């Protein structure tokens, strides 16, 4: 993983001291909340319903054990003993006191972490495939390119005050594990017919109030022009993006209103100028960055056999283990979705267990996933049983990856001042209703996602089954959506009809899945069946 150089460290340290002074002035009354708000947001500090929330940047989701132990320490010392992993591969603390924020930033800086650009109308944390560098199906490790993006976008003078926040994802396989086409810019690493490395570039995706799937803007961008082309994409947006209407400020609105073809034409026109400015670094600079991401020292000649005589362990292996590119190794996902738990939450003690397992069994590497879980990317198959035993003892061995209880959920009205409805209790009720593992596995792959408001932090539009919490005359109400996907087969869910109360929407999901089981064909996922038979049979099953 990337390590700070002297410039990275000095920038982060300077930011800590600046913020320490700003907080002192706010606490003394020398600065009003209106004056302080843009400054705290630049440091990832939000004022939520009950306390301050601090969002920690985890570039492309990659962490080491030292960093995870620091997060555990902060959870224990400054929060209520836990943290919340997010869909942008970051981590949030929900119970921060303002007076402690500068000390937290200072402690983060000692392990090469920060909160910079986790808020504001800037380029946010670049996300990537949690299996990067380990996946059997990737063309190359996308993380060096994500790191190049991080360095280019950090404190970029032209893009610090964009019309609206801006999100980028980069992947390197045909299977999209990062919801790449639901980003402002999505990049897929590909090879052309001549075998040259380059990128497919998608621009104008996003969820929220007006969900859109990003159209393809460029079929093949040569690798040497990576930054200059993205610079041109941002320049066109920065020039014409709406600043007069927050609801129309995202790049997806610009691309939609002028059309993808016209947007692409303007980008090409801008790029003709930008690429003469020397913004693209020499390949030697990319090679310098890539050297931080060299594969670990894998052992050769390891066996691929796994003793599956323990049925509980076998269920975990069948569900939570993914093929690794190196023989004898596996990718292990740690579910943060125990039945009855809060999706994405981990206690300080659980973080320390995960850190120890990474240190001992996964070359000191962990990844935060887009689905709010944690991955150990490089585990010997011979060590999987020991890893599972430790996870089981820590309450982290739930075997539900990509099943109905592996729910993405935003914090909702329990924490967020923007929310209209609670997400967490609903996620818990759904998980409990479908708790038996044999029932979950019979239903197969099923992505269920819950948002507590139209801002869609729970990505409900992209759920095979999505739930949107709304306010109906002071009462929490839940709309049910079907048919969404954030994967390579990206689609947006369709609202089925009138909403439900909390218990009613759980019952509606049950009726939906009864219909699925009645009409599915062998091997079909829920999404496949929905697309084959259409919307109406499911609507009839839900509403009668």
Image: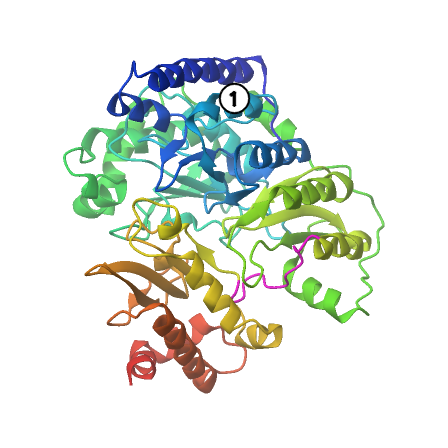
Left or right, residue 104 beside residue 542: right
Left or right, residue 135 beside residue 405: right
Badge count: 1
Q: Nearer the viewer, residue 51 or 453?
A: 51
Q: Quadrant of the N terminus?
A: top right
Question: In the rendered structure, which segment of residues is drawn in magenta?
Answer: 394-405
Residue at (17% x, 44% y) in the render? 258
Residue at (27% x, 59% y) in the render? 470
Q: Quadrant of the C terminus?
A: bottom left
Q: Find residue 174 and report its horizontal and vertical position in percent.
A: 51, 54
Q: Secondary structure at mark 1?
A: helix
Q: Find residue 328 and report its horizontal and vertical position in percent.
A: 78, 53
Residue 289 is covered by the magenta coloring: no
Badge 1: how crowded within 10 Å, few (<14), some, or many (20+)? Answer: some
Q: Name the chief secondary structure element in magenta.
A: loop
Residue 126 to residue 343: above or below: above
Residue 4 to residue 381: above or below: above
Left or right, residue 207 beside residue 443: left
Q: Residue 278's image quarter? A: top left
Q: Find residue 326 and report its horizontal and vertical position in percent.
A: 73, 49
Q: According to the image, label 1 marks what residue?
A: 103
């Amino acid at each position: 993983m990337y390590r700070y150089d002297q410039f990275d460290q000095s920038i982060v340290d300077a930011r800590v001291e600046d913020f320490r002074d700003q907080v002192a002035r706010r606490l003394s009354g020398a600065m009003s909340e209106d004056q302080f708000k843009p400054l705290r947001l630049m440091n990832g500090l939000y004022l939520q319903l009950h306390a301050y929330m601090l969002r920690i940047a985890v570039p492309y989701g990659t962490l080491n054990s030292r960093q995870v132990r620091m997060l555990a320490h902060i959870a224990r010392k400054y929060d209520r003993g836990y943290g919340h992993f997010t869909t942008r591969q970051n981590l949030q603390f929900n119970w921060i006191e303002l007076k402690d924020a500068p000390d937290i930033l200072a402690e983060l800086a000692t392990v090469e972490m920060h909160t910079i650009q986790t808020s504001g109308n800037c380029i946010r944390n670049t996300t990537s495939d949690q299996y990067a560098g380990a996946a059997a199906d990737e063309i190359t490790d996308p993380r060096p390119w994500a790191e190049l993006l991080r360095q280019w976008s950090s404190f970029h003078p032209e893009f610090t005050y964009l019309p609206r926040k801006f999100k980028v994802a980069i992947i390197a396989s045909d299977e999209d594990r990062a919801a790449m086409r639901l980003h402002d810019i999505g990049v897929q690493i590909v090879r052309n017919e001549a075998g040259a490395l380059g990128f497919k570039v998608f621009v104008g995706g996003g969820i929220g109030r007006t969900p859109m799937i990003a159209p393809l803007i460029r079929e093949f961008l040569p690798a040497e022009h990576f930054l200059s082309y993205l610079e041109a994409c941002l320049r066109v947006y920065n020039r014409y993006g709406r600043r007069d209407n927050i609801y129309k400020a995202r790049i997806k609105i610009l691309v939609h209103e002028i059309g993808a073809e016209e947007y692409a034409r303007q980008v090409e026109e801008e790029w003709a100028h930008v690429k003469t400015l020397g913004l693209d670094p020499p390949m030697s600079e990319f090679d310098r960055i890539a050297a931080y991401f060299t594969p670990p020292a894998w052992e050769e000649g390891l066996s691929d056999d796994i003793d599956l005589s323990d049925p509980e362990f076998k269920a975990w292996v069948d569900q939570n283990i993914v093929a690794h590119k190196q023989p004898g190794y596996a990718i292990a996902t740690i579910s943060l979705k125990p039945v009855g738990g809060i999706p994405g939450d981990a206690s300080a003690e659980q973080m320390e267990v995960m850190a120890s397992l990474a240190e001992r069994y996964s070359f000191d590497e962990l990844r935060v996933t887009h689905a709010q879980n944690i991955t150990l990317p490089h585990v010997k198959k011979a060590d999987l049983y020991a890893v599972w035993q430790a996870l089981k003892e820590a309450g982290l061995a739930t075997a539900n990856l990509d099943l109905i209880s592996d729910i993405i959920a935003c914090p909702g009205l329990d924490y967020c001042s923007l929310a209209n409805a609670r997400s967490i209790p609903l996620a818990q009720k759904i998980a409990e209703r479908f708790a038996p593992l044999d029932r979950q596995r019979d239903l197969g792959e099923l992505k269920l996602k819950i948002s507590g408001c139209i801002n869609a932090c729970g990505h409900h539009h992209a759920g095979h089954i999505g739930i949107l919490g709304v306010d109906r005359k002071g009462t929490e109400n839940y709309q049910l959506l079907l048919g969404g996907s954030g994967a390579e087969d990206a689609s947006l869910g369709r609202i089925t009809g009138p909403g439900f109360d909390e218990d009613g929407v759980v019952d509606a999901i049950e009726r939906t899945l009864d219909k699925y089981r009645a009409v599915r064909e062998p091997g079909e996922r829920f999404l496949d069946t929905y697309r084959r038979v259409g919307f109406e049979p499911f609507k009839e099953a839900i509403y009668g």
